[in-house]
Image (tube, rainbow, N blue to C red):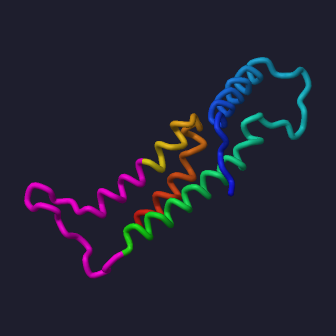
Amino acid sequence: KIEIPAGGGRLLYALEALDRKARRHPEPRNRPGASSLVDILVPHVTAALEESFGALNRDITSTLDGEAAVIFQPLKPPSLLHCERVVTLWSFVHKALDTPLKIGVPVDIVAQPFLRFLQEAVQ
């Protein structure tokens, strides 16, 4: 199982700050293949996020699986025109985005894996 360790988000922010400082003071000679420090970790963080989002998507599917004939059933019409499954889905979606942001993973790293998860979750 791939996970972002505790403090991983803070490490990414620190590396981004170091990369910004390094760009302000470039080396006198150009090094071929030189990349930023964050770029070294992004594929691993992305893989961890995609695995977490995939597991969450499986949880959503198993939680919301039910009778296919019931597509939309308002809770208390006309005052509540949403159904319990919609509320549950959006609760999962909110937690999916909130969790990596809470541990400090930068938004630009979370965005693409989250958008892929969201696309799968709402289909």
The magenta segment: 66-94
Image location of residue 100, percent across then percent down: 54, 42
**Residue in the image at 23% along x and 70% along y:** 72
In the rendered structure, does residue 36 fall within the stretch colored magenta?
no
Image location of residue 36, percent across then percent down: 77, 34
- In the rendered image, the quadrant that contains the C terminus is bottom left
Q: Nearer the viewer, residue 20 or 15?
A: 15
Q: Is residue 102 above or below residue 85?
A: above
Q: Is residue 17 above or below residue 65?
A: above
**Residue in the image at 37% along x and 68% along y:** 64
Q: Nearer the viewer, residue 19 or 65?
A: 65
**Residue in the image at 73% along x and 20% along y:** 21
- Furthest residue toward left: 78
Q: Nearer the viewer, residue 105 or 3?
A: 3
Q: Nearer the viewer, residue 2 or 13?
A: 2
- The quarter holding residue 86 reads bottom left
- The quarter holding residue 10 reads top right
- The quarter holding residue 92 reads bottom left
Left or right of 98? Residue 12 is right
**Residue in the image at 52% along x and 38% along y:** 101
Marker count (numbered): 0
Q: Is residue 77 above or below residue 26?
A: below
- Furthest residue toward top: 25
Q: Magenta part mainly helix, strand or loop?
A: loop
- In the rendered image, the quadrant that contains the N terminus is bottom right
